[in-house]
Image: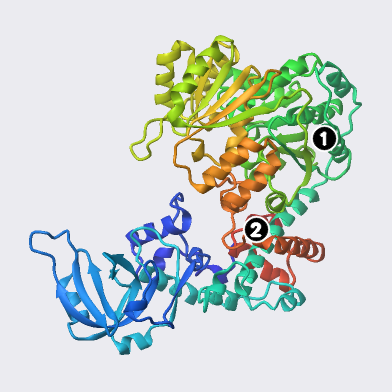
Amino acid sequence: MRPEILNPLFASIGKLQGIGPKLEKLFTVLLKGGAQTTSACVVDLLWHLPAGLIDRRFQPKISDVIAGELATVKVTIGEHIPPPKHQRRLPYRVQCFDDTGTLDLIFFHAHTDYLKKQIPEGSIRFISGKIEMFRENPQMPHPDHMLSKEEFDQLPLIEPIYPMTGGLARKTLQRSVNLALERVPQMPEWQDVPWKTSQKYQSFNDALNSAHAPTDYQCLEPDHIARLRLAYDELLANQLALGLVRAHMRKTAGRVTMGSGELRTKLLSILPFSLTRSQVQSVEEILKDMGSPERMLRLLQGDVGSGKTIVALLAMLCAIEAGAQAAIMAPTEILARQHHELMERLCQQLDVHVVILTGRETGKKREDVLGKIKSGEAQIIIGTHAIFQSGVEFKDLALAVIDEQHRFGVHQRLALQAKAVNGLGLDLLVMTATPIPRTLTLTIYGDMEVSKLLEKPAGRLPVDTRVLPISRLSDVTQRLAQTLAQGAQVYWVCPLVEDSEVIDLTSAEQRHESLKTLFGDKVGLIHGRMKGAEKDAVMEQFRAHELNILVATTVIEVGVDVPNATIMIIEHAERFGLAQLHQLRGRVGRGDEKSSCLLLYQAPLSETASKRLKIMRETEDGFLIAEEDLKLRGTGELLGTKQSGFAQFHIANLDVHSKLLAAARDDATMIIAKDPTLTTQRGEALRILLYLFERNEAIKLLNAG
């Protein structure tokens, strides 16, 4: 249960005075990105900090105003000039002047009676708003304030400016923030007192009020003392939650899984390559974890094509050697079937029985697979999240592998525990081909040990990456005809499935049609809206070389493996994030033929897009690319989309607050060591902190014992 003290903050934003259904929708767009089905809460307003301010302490004369800047000017109101009767689209103008010049106030769709009453001719008014220049004369469209001296004296000289959304008035937002701040109860202190004193932090309440009431531009910076306090609170909630998950997972007794090594030795003898140094080290780390009485919680982080699947298979064979079962869960059916194809091919030579279970296995076929899993005849089980749903019973599951971890949240890792037998905890290995910058690893995978694959398997050739404007498309298709004649296969990636009237991009369907006109029926199409069986059929045709060109959306981003495909063309590459471009490029260069990647862009390029394409041209190092992506896009957009497994921060900015993250990690470790159930006075306050920053999954673990 959420602490009662927080209930006023987690009420719907519509409970604030003056916010009806229409405004509630606008606030949800502003505060939740518009993608949420639930309304924004009052607490979301607290984290919506000012990005600028109006400083009315400096009040220039009209001759000193600057275009594009906010200004507060004392003026005499002159003539009101309405638009001609038959030209209502022209603005209503009000001339103003002081002893240095003139300034026009501009109003579209003006309420004439209101303006004549608010700013009558001959009156003295303080006018505040943004200055524009029209034919070298200053003007102010729709001023924020038009006040008498008495009214102006009541106005704050410094006013915060918040990020906005269309249709929402600035005054409405400011008033709502003030109402939200009034609802904040006096919070208990959850920070370590000596740390708080050494950092000269205010209390949480004072820091929050200070952050919403900047007195100068320095107050808007992420390293201002008030924002540092709030950022540390958020990072502490993050690290404490991950620490509690880790402690809970480890509390369940692990099982000692030690195999004979017979199957692993046999597998290594039939592989057409030797393991890289990183693969050998990672396998050793994983086997050591499996052989210890503590549960394994390990992340295997490897760049595209670094050989994670073989490392996972070696770990699974260790479980089979020990007489148990192993399972691997993939985020998509395409990837699950690809794993099945590879592992079955290898395991047939080892006499190890492999089955696959996805949403598509139905009826008798599904019953047959479920029977084999329950009896233990199925030793390696591959599938989507379907393999961990109720109704799937394992005889003795010792190891669970999750592929592409960022597609799954922490709670899905916890759900796996229910599949363990005899009260013993499952060993858990999670894998990701999305390299995570060092600064983010702690915030996302702080509950896990990490193994890294740093090299690509021997024999992998670098991918030649080129950048071309889309205006040269005809040159590309001409060159493609020559390459296809030599037996090459091509991926052609588009950002949209079908034509959009909103965004002028060539869709996958339209590109598919145009390429079919040029190259005939050897052109296939695959996208996320197709049914699983349709996608598999197209992929199988491409693998079997019945198709030469596969037009696709980013559905092929993760894990698809067709070694004969040597060309990747990405249309409108400027629309993709760096990590996504890197993942897509990783679909080629998987065989022993030289491969190339062509990034087609629509000119003109923004500065960020230009930097992105330059980085892609210069390096294939996924870890370096991840660091650059973080610099260009910030933590909230690391993958281009907000994935459930990734921590989203309201205030913390890891570019600025990385030292605070390390301190929060140490603090959380100390808290869990001294007060693992959070029952001391500080522990009770920390429970409030976890709920405040919506890390309450961790509290459920405490309550579950």
Counting from the top left corner in percent of width and height, residue 81 is at 14, 72
Q: Quick one: label 1 or label 2, which is nearer the N terminus?
A: 1
In this rendered view, identify the residue nearer to me: 696 or 335.
335
Quarter in which the C terminus is drawn: bottom right
The disc label shown at residue 371, or none:
none
Q: Residue at x 73, y 79 (%)?
A: 197
Estimate the x, y position of residue 360 in percent, counting from the top left: 55, 23
The quarter holding residue 433 reads top right
Task: Look at mark 2 in the image and give the residue it sits on.
Answer: 655
Crowd band around label 2 with a 10 angstrom C-alpha radius: few (<14), some (14–19), many (20+): some
The amino acid type of the residue labelled 1 equals: Ser
Q: Is residue 516 above or below residue 138?
A: above
Asked whether residue 678 appears in the rendered view, the answer is yes
Question: Vertically, is 237 above or below 566?
Answer: below
Query: Total number of numbered labels?
Result: 2
Q: Which residue is mark 1?
A: 278
Image check: 200 left or right of 98? right
Residue at the far left in the pictured view = 85
Eye-nearest disc, 1 or 2: 2
Q: Secondary structure at mark 1?
A: helix
The one of 79 and 224 positioned closer to us in this rendering: 79
Q: Quick check: 447 left or right of 646?
A: right
